[in-house]
Image (cartoon, grey):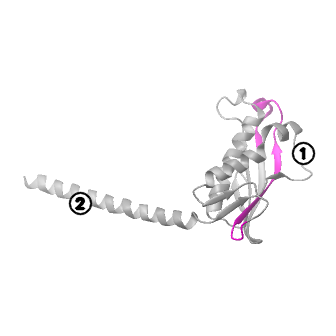
């Protein structure tokens, strides 16, 4: 009887400790969300660097610039109260993200023609003042069943993960950051 009481006491004590720990972590998480979930992010139209060679079919059919902006917006939606991807005017207190695609390796033939790669460079500003900058790249061979995927599908995998990389960086932007496989 006495042993059952001791086990019951230990069990209840352990439960009370778990409850307070989880409520503390929830408070910390809510504070972190409230700090980062403020303000507006403007994602300027993503462009290809002038002078780089990118196959016309990749530029015209893969929509890497549009997909990258979409993935950044999707993955950053909890960090900002508003995200604008197409705007001529920038709100005064908004953070502005500018990205240039500096290199694309994407021969036709899907995975049969080798791995695909996308390299981007970006900067974050507010009121013209530089907050941070990064360089990021991702490459993929197509993953499972890659031999049956096309070039745009594989490059799409690259920009999807780059969108996640940039979103994580936006939570704590630094200067000269290297993201992904960079």
Label 1's element? loop
In this rendering, the answer to whether 179 lies above or below 175 is: above
Quarter placement of the C terminus: bottom right
**Residue neighbourhood size for the residue with mark 1, other residues' Cα within 10 Å, grouped as few (<14), some (14–19), many (≥20):** few
Residue occupying the point 8% across, 55% down: 2
Q: What is the magenta range? A: 91-117
Query: Residue 74, position in %: x, y?
Result: 63, 50
Magenta region includes residue 116: yes
The one nearer the camera, 173 or 1, is: 173
Label 2's element? helix
The one nearer the camera, 92 or 155, is: 92
Query: Residue 23, position in %: x, y?
Result: 37, 62
Q: Quadrant of residue 64?
A: top right
Q: Quadrant of residue 177?
A: bottom right
Residue situated furthest right in the rendering: 51
Number of residue marks: 2
The one nearer the camera, 61 or 139, is: 61
Magenta region includes residue 115: yes
Tag 1 residue: 53
Query: Residue 175, position in %: x, y?
Result: 72, 67
Residue occupying the point 83% across, 52% down: 47
Query: Residue 133, position in %: x, y?
Result: 74, 64
Tag 2 residue: 13
Does residue 5 appear left or right of residue 181 in this picture?
Answer: left
- The reply to whether residue 138 is in sight is no
Q: Quadrant of residue 37?
A: bottom right
Q: CA distance from mark 2 to mark 1?
A: 65 Å
Residue situated furthest top in the rendering: 148
**Residue neighbourhood size for the residue with mark 2, other residues' Cα within 10 Å, grouped as few (<14), some (14–19), many (≥20):** few
First of labels 2, 1 by sequence position: 2
């Amino acid at each position: 009887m006495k042993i059952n009481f001791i086990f019951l006491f230990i069990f209840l004590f352990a439960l009370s400790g778990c409850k307070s720990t989880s409520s503390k972590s929830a408070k910390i998480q809510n504070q972190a969300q409230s700090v980062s979930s403020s303000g507006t992010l403007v994602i300027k139209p993503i462009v290809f660097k002038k002078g780089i060679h990118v196959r016309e079919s990749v530029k015209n059919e893969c929509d890497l610039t549009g997909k990258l902006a979409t993935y950044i917006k999707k993955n950053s939606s909890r960090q900002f109260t508003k995200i604008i991807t197409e705007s001529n005017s920038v709100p005064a207190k908004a953070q502005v993200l500018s990205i240039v695609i500096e290199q694309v390796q994407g021969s036709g033939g899907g995975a049969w023609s080798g791995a695909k790669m996308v390299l981007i460079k970006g900067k974050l500003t507010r009121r013209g003042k530089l907050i941070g900058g990064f360089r990021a790249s991702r490459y993929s061979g197509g993953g499972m069943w890659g031999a049956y995927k096309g070039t745009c599908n594989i490059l799409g995998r690259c920009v999807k993960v780059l969108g996640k990389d940039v979103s994580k960086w936006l939570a704590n932007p630094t200067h000269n950051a290297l993201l992904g496989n960079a």
